[in-house]
Image (cartoon, rainbow, N blue to C red):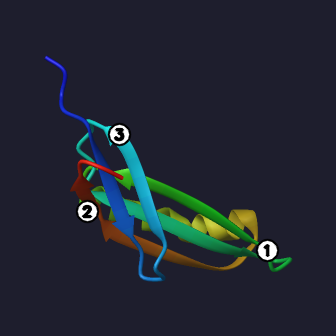
Amino acid sequence: MARKKYYLTATLPDGYVKTIGPTALDFTHYWRVVAVLANGKTEVFWGHSKSLREAKSKQAALTDAAAMRGWTSYDFDIVELVKTTEP
């Protein structure tokens, strides 16, 4: 039997709202990296995870990523996803 699908919504501290779905996957957290490049431009990387622990593990690689990609700085946010039936 097919699993019921729903939407997942993340609201970040800066007010940005990301909606994922419809999905039947059990994601619990959304993470986002906003990186500032040497030329002043920004790059955004994001994803979702099935636990807070999994989301926090993404932060460990950021120091290496910043050095490899030449970021001057970055912000990393993790927020809980909220399930809804509509976007």
Amino acid tagged 1: Lys
Q: Is residue 36 left or right of residue 52?
A: right
Q: Earlier in the sequence, mark 3 or mark 1?
A: 3
Provide the secondary structure element on which disc 1 rests. loop
> In the displayed image of the protein, which residue is found farthest to the left?
1
For the image, the number of numbered tags is 3
In three-dimensional space, the C-alpha distance between marks 3 and 1, rounded to whole angstroms, equals 32 Å
In three-dimensional space, the C-alpha distance between marks 2 and 1, rounded to whole angstroms, equals 29 Å
Amino acid tagged 2: Leu
Relative to 39, is 10 above or below?
Answer: above
Q: Residue at x 49, y 66 (%)?
A: 32
Near-viewer residue (17 or 73): 17
Q: Residue at x 31, y 48 (%)?
A: 7
Q: From the top left corner, tell me how far across and down residue 48 is, in percent.
A: 38, 53
Provide the secondary structure element on which disc 3 rests. strand
The residue tagged 3 is 22
Q: Earlier in the sequence, mark 3 or mark 2?
A: 3
> Is residue 86 visible in this depiction of the protein?
yes
Near-viewer residue (10 or 29): 10
Q: Earlier in the sequence, mark 2 or mark 1?
A: 1
